Structure formats: C-alpha cells, structure tokens
Image (cartoon, grey):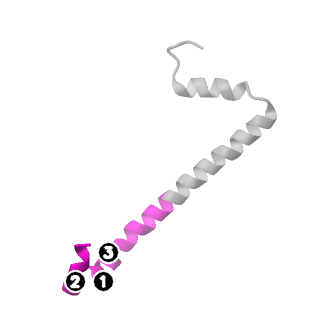
Amino acid sequence: MSIAQNPETKLIEKIRSLPPDKIMVLEDFLDFLLTRSEENLLVYTATKLSEAAFAKIWDNPEDAEYDEL
C-alpha cells in the first residue's frame, strides 16, 4: 500500500484480503451500523416533527418556572 492511498482504497484492499467467513462477519457488522444510523435518523426526525406539538403544551406562563430547572 502506498502512503498516498485514500482511506476507501485501503479499506477495499483489506476487505479483499479477508477470508470468506470474515467477509460475512464484516457484512453483518456493516448492516448493523447502517441500521443503527437509520434508527438514529428516525428518532431524530420524529423528535423534530413533534417539537411544534410539544411547544404548544410546554411554552406557557404556567410552566415557565420549570424552564429555570
């Protein structure tokens, strides 16, 4: 490997050097990482979408003292 290679090229070379059973493990791990990213995005999106609804409930004079906590 040359020093000037980009990280993607290095990674591909390492993957190509793995035995088939290790490639299957790597694929499972990559699927896990992708799923986790998708789940985090879903939670973030749901949170952002619900902010307006909760703002109507939480942003009121009666609950203002809780903002200080």
Determine whether 42 is above or below 25 in the image.
below
Q: Nearer the viewer, residue 60 or 39?
A: 60
Amino acid type indicated by mark 3:
Ala
The magenta stretch spans residue 48: yes
What residue does disc 3 label? Answer: 52
State the separation of the CA atoms marked 3 and 1. Answer: 9 Å
- Residue topped by disc 2: 60
- Magenta span of residues: 41-69
For marks 1 and 2, give the CA distance. 7 Å
**Residue contact between numbered discs 3 and 1, judged by CB atoms under 8 Å:** no
Tag shown at residue 57: 1
Q: Is residue 68 left or right of residue 9?
A: left
Q: Is residue 26 above or below residue 6?
A: below
Q: Residues within 10 Å of mark 2 (few under 14, many from 20)?
A: few
> Which residue is at the front of the view, 64 or 45?
64
Query: How many labels sit on residues?
Result: 3
Which numbered disc flags the more N-terminal residue, 3 or 1? 3
Say which amino acid is labelled 1: Ile
Compared with 26, 62 (above or below) is below
Q: Nearer the viewer, mark 3 or mark 1?
A: 1
From what the image shows, is residue 3 above or below residue 38?
above
| 15 sits to left or right of 6 | right
